[in-house]
Amino acid sequence: MPISGAVLDRLGTRSALRTGPALVCFAALAAAFMPWFGLILVLVFVLGIGESIWVIAREVAGIDLARLDQRGRVLSGFHGVNNLGLALGPLAGGMLTEAAGFRGVFAAYAACAGAAVLLGSSVGNSPSSHASEAAADSVAGWGLAAQVQRLHALKNLFYQIPPDLRATYCVLVFATLTSFVHRVTTQSILPLYASSQLGLTPKEIGLLFSISGLCVFIMILPAGFVIDKIGRKWATVPSTGIPAIAFLLIPFSGSFLQLAILLCFLGVANGLSLGSLATSTYDVAPPNARGRLQAARRTIAEIGGVGAPLLGGFLADTFNPGVPFLAYAPLLVLSAVLLAIVGRETLQR
């Protein structure tokens, strides 16, 4: 994520839209013919870097192409279509694996990435206002002095945000972290709770997530309308407040129907958060630093997304699978309160 933000701000959106998929195409194609598993892991790491660059670039490109009053719908559409691909991709990959082996999946992935390079080349390039600062901001080496300089650079980056919007950016970062926490906790701990506490079958658990995914998909257009026409906070506050209520109730659910209702509400919340937090961040960030500020927000959130299942698993083993939901609910409540009280409404009317 930090690499993607720097690439975007220094080279512009078109370069990032081509660089990311090009890295993915190279890594996937090499993995398709690589006979050593250790090197396949290295290539998958490179593939992850390419995906991160593309994820940030697609959002900025959408912001550049859309009018100010269309940002919410554009980003909601991006995230919604991406979620649809994430839902259908494993099915296509599984069918391709059975037909041609796992190497065929890497080859197909490379072909998709190659097509993305061509599509990215057709997108207009955003002005690279940060290019003139590249020499001044670059830091060489990995010693203590170099790390201190990088921390100063991060502080200077934060101070580029207008003073009246800095608290809002911090709240958006925290809200994104809690959003990642509740999503990965739902994905990792809910199946444990449903199977061990309620005795649900794998089919029933899969149906629960399908119901939630359908609610997310249904919310794509309504969420974009709320973000663009009513207000950013009308989407961001419920996107963390609703999961807080659901997390408090999940440990007390006693049937498939009750869990399904709660998963519906979580799906609605996920739908509202698809583009609202990203749109609000772009409203706050200055054009010359938006890639790095967006990447910083996502990096912190990803750290939470990695740590939450580990702590959740520990709590589930120590107590029971319902405890992680109760433990994370206060974070979601705090996030909703901060968004409502501290965060500013960034929709320009």
Image (cartoon, rainbow, N blue to C red):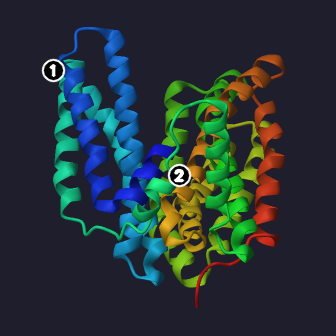
Taking depth in this image into account, of 249 and 100 the one nearest to the observer is: 100
Q: Does residue 165 lie above or below 91 as drawn?
A: below
Which residue is at 69% across, 21% downward?
Answer: 196
Amino acid identity at mark 1: Ala
Q: Position of residue 211 (x, y in %)?
A: 51, 47
- Look at the numbered discs 2 and 1 and tell me whether their residues touch, using CB distance below 8 Å: no
Q: Does residue 11 lie above or below 320 as drawn?
A: below
Which residue is at 44% across, 79% downward?
Answer: 70
Q: Position of residue 198 (x, y in %)?
A: 70, 28
Q: Any mark on residue 100, and which?
A: 1
Taking depth in this image into account, of 297 and 145 the one nearest to the observer is: 145
In-image side of 25 versus 7 (left or right): left
Q: Position of residue 238 (x, y in %)?
A: 69, 64
Q: What SS does tag 2 mark?
A: helix
Q: Is residue 1 visible?
A: no
Q: What SS does tag 1 mark?
A: helix
In-image side of 155 versus 4 (left or right): right
Judging by the rendered image, the residue that carries numbered circle 2 is 295
Q: Is residue 155 visible?
A: yes
Q: Does residue 156 lie above or below 317 as drawn?
A: below
Q: Residue furthest top?
A: 36
Indicate the quadrant containing the C terminus: top left, top right, bottom left or bottom right.
bottom right
Which residue is at 53% across, 33% downward?
Answer: 141
> Between disc 2 and disc 1, whose residue precedes?
1
